[in-house]
Image (tube, rainbow, N blue to C red):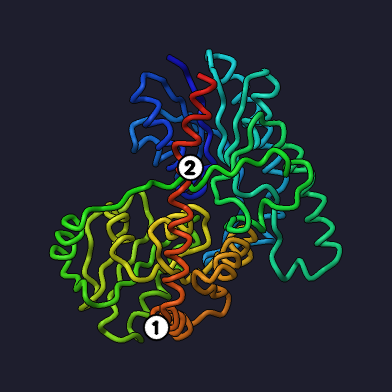
Amino acid sequence: MGLAYFAPYGVGLGHASRLVMVADELRKNGSNAKFSSFGEAANYIVMRGYRCSMVAPVEFAWSMEGGFSVKDSLANIPLWFANFSRQVNQETRSIAACRLNVVVSDSRLSHVVAARLLKIPSIVILNQVKLLLSPRLRQLAVSRLFESMVGEFMGSMWALADRVLVPDLPPPYTIAAHNVWNIGSTSRKLEYVGFTTPRIQPSERRMEELAESLGIDRSSPLVFVHVSGPFQTRMALVKLALEAKRLLDPKIQFVISEGNAKGDPKPKKIAQSAWYYEWCPVRDEIFAMSDLLVLRGGHVTLSQAIQFGKPVVTVPIENHGEQLGNSTKMADLGLGIMLRHKGLGAGQLADGISHVLSRPEFKKKAEELQRIAEKMDGINNVLQIVRSYL
């Protein structure tokens, strides 16, 4: 019996959900897992039946208009350093108090540092090695130089881990290419393990039952608006999607998920062919039934879109470099289109949805990458690497 210490980043649920899946598999074989996180991720971990130590948050600032706030984030830099130091101190004590075999960090640097100080093996799961600035800032030469310098520094810090696992497809299909490529200090340590989202294919019977209970017509197009990311950024896209629905052909059906882990899991019918979830407990079934997904640019949800072979319309959080990079790559691969959130109107979103639905080449390309992704079982690959330390 071994003990692994899991430390997912606390904003959004993607980082926590993949580590919980690994922990679930370890528990089946008698190994134990401890968790440490903050924010919504900590709530999700507890909801899944694990104890989770709360640590001081290190996170960006967001605007209620659905964007990344550069001004407020810069103002938070002193707090980041203070909370990062608190995290390292707290985690060093927590790790030292346990007889751990391995520390597994998902996008949290403090645990890599703490594990290195205590000479305990560490694994980091990472789909963003460097911090990408917004396109507006990157127009300045000094900003590009700053981004490059910070990228090399962060790369050298992540390289302190024994293993650096990228939950993505290998080149040239890497969705996080803009975020992980061309960092000299870590490039040689990157291991592409495949997507770490659940490999679930709901049964046709289950989907028919769900369609009947909601009143979904399987012969008409279904759009799933799956909103994720920091709480402050979600409702702006939800409102935009509701307005876009009214402008589209009534035959185009909508399911909207607010992505609130503490929200009501019961659907509300909000129009003749539209349903709304605060928290969608049948997300996989809706993914599988949908003809098009409207998503942010988070790596986990984009990964799942590919695993289900679905074309996308992405609306990345404004000024969020990672999501912009992911969304740009999805568009470059022909999997859908990207719409910029700033200045986006309901009419433009409706036009984007109609454009992707009406062109079969998007679905064809999505199914092509689905077949490539099926050859790599990311969760199992991570699981086997973690087990090798137990």
Q: Is residue 322 above or below residue 9?
A: below
In this image, 208 relative to 127: left or right? left
Q: Residue at x 42, y 71 (%)?
A: 363
The disc placed on residue 358 is: 1
**Which badge, 2 or 1, is on the more N-terminal residue?**
1
Q: Residue at x 13, y 65 (%)?
A: 212
Q: Residue at x 69, y 65 (%)?
A: 134
The location of residue 354, given as percent across then percent down, is 40, 83
Q: For the residues marked 2 and 1, what is the alpha-carbon distance in whole angstroms?
A: 32 Å
In this image, 199 relative to 251: left or right? right
Query: Which quadrant of the rendered structure holds the N terminus?
Result: top left
Q: Secondary structure at mark 2?
A: helix
The location of residue 314, given as percent across then percent down, is 50, 69
Q: Residue at x 60, y 36 (%)?
A: 124
- Badge 2 local density, few (<14 within 10 Å), some, or many (20+)? many
The disc placed on residue 378 is: 2
